[in-house]
């Protein structure tokens, strides 16, 4: 088999794998996550929800409590972090404010309990995308065949229990889609808002500087646009003299 034939076979195998992956997820209608990382009230609610419901298993080890608090504006008018509010609402361990956000769960314990150690979620929104996380948190449903009694439409045979079950309530799978079988402490609208806050928070954590990056990017494009105009005028002026020779 020559090189050309080998490349053809590899391309066919790759295309087949991509096609299979698309078919596996095509049954799930992915909703758009209404993310707004400039909504600091939403970010603060999302941070509180994460610390209360998720931080027991998942860490944000590339983020520190003090920098997070400053980023989501838990600060006074001068920009100083409100230490007491952060410690009372976000820190549930005896650690300094400048510590990274670690989970108390040991990696081996997580692997033993869930079959796989719960991942760090600092970059999850960049890896999966906000839409994936949003739909994942909305599509848990009861499945007695699973170890934790739940499954997920976006991530079939998920190892994670539905930690927000008490908030959302129990959903069941029907021919017409997921239906609420047992209400939780929140209405469906309230739960969806809570999920938006959590996804918004994880999106911010994955890249705290993204708003500044976009603002700088806009000015860079303006500069390049002006630079192109002057470059063209300079080029035309230079070549005008060259052509006269």
Image (tube, rainbow, N blue to C red):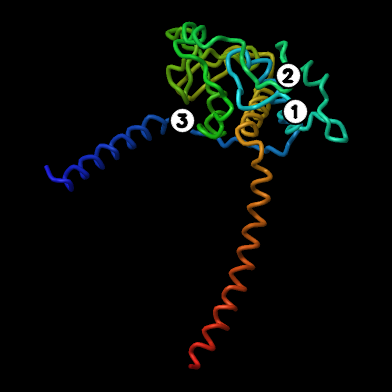
Compared to 232, does 157 lie above or below?
Answer: above
Q: Residue at x 81, y 28 (%)?
A: 81
Q: Of tags 3 and 2, which is closer to the observer?
A: 2
Check disc 3 and report the residue beneath it.
28
Q: Residue at x 55, y 22 (%)?
A: 120
Q: Of tags 3 and 1, which is closer to the observer?
A: 1
Is the C-beta separation of discs 3 and 1 under 8 Å? no
Label 3 neighbour load within 10 Å: few <14, some 14-19, many 20+: few
Q: Position of residue 43 (x, y in %)?
A: 71, 30
What whole-number distance in Å separates the C-alpha atoms at marks 3 and 2?
34 Å
What whole-number distance in Å separates the C-alpha atoms at marks 3 and 1?
36 Å
Compared to 195, does 87 lie above or below?
Answer: above
**Quadrant housing residue 145:** top left
Compare residues 169 and 103 and report the one nearer the observer: 103
Label 2 neighbour load within 10 Å: few <14, some 14-19, many 20+: many
Q: Is residue 132 at least partly visible in the picture?
A: yes
Q: Residue at x 47, y 10 (%)?
A: 111
Is the C-beta separation of discs 1 and 2 under 8 Å? yes
Q: Is residue 149 at least partly visible in the picture?
A: no
Mark closer to the chain start, 3 or 2: 3
Q: Secondary structure at mark 2?
A: loop
Is the C-beta separation of discs 3 and 2 under 8 Å? no
Check disc 1 and report the residue beneath it.
69
Residue farthest to the left, as pictured: 1
Q: Position of residue 141 (x, y in %)?
A: 51, 16
Q: Position of residue 207 (x, y in %)?
A: 62, 36
Q: Secondary structure at mark 3?
A: loop
**Quadrant housing residue 163:** top right
Report the number of discs.
3
Mark closer to the chain start, 1 or 2: 1
Check disc 2 and report the residue beneath it.
90
In the displayed structure, does residue 106 sit left or right of residue 50? left
């Amino acid at each position: 088999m020559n090189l050309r034939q080998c490349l053809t076979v590899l391309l066919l195998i790759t295309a087949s794998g991509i096609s299979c992956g698309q078919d596996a997820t095509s049954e799930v209608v992915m909703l758009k996550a209404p993310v707004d990382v400039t909504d600091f009230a939403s970010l603060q609610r999302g941070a509180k929800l994460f610390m209360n419901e998720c931080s027991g298993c998942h860490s944000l080890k590339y983020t520190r409590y003090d920098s997070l608090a400053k980023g989501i504006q838990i600060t006074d008018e001068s920009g100083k972090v409100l230490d007491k509010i952060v410690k009372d609402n976000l820190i549930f361990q005896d650690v300094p404010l400048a510590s990274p956000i670690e989970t108390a769960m040991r990696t081996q314990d997580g692997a033993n309990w869930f079959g796989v150690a719960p991942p760090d979620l600092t970059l999850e929104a960049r890896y999966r995308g906000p839409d994936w996380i949003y739909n994942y948190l909305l599509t848990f449903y009861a499945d007695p065949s699973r170890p934790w009694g739940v499954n997920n439409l976006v991530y079939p045979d998920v190892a994670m229990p539905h930690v927000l079950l008490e908030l959302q309530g129990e959903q069941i799978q029907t021919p017409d889609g997921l239906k609420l079988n047992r209400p939780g402490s929140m209405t469906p609208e309230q739960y969806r808002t809570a999920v938006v806050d959590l996804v918004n928070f994880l999106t911010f954590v994955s890249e705290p500087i993204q708003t500044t990056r976009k603002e700088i990017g806009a000015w860079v494009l303006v500069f390049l646009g002006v630079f192109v105009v002057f470059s063209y005028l300079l080029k035309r002026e230079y070549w005008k003299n060259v052509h006269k020779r």
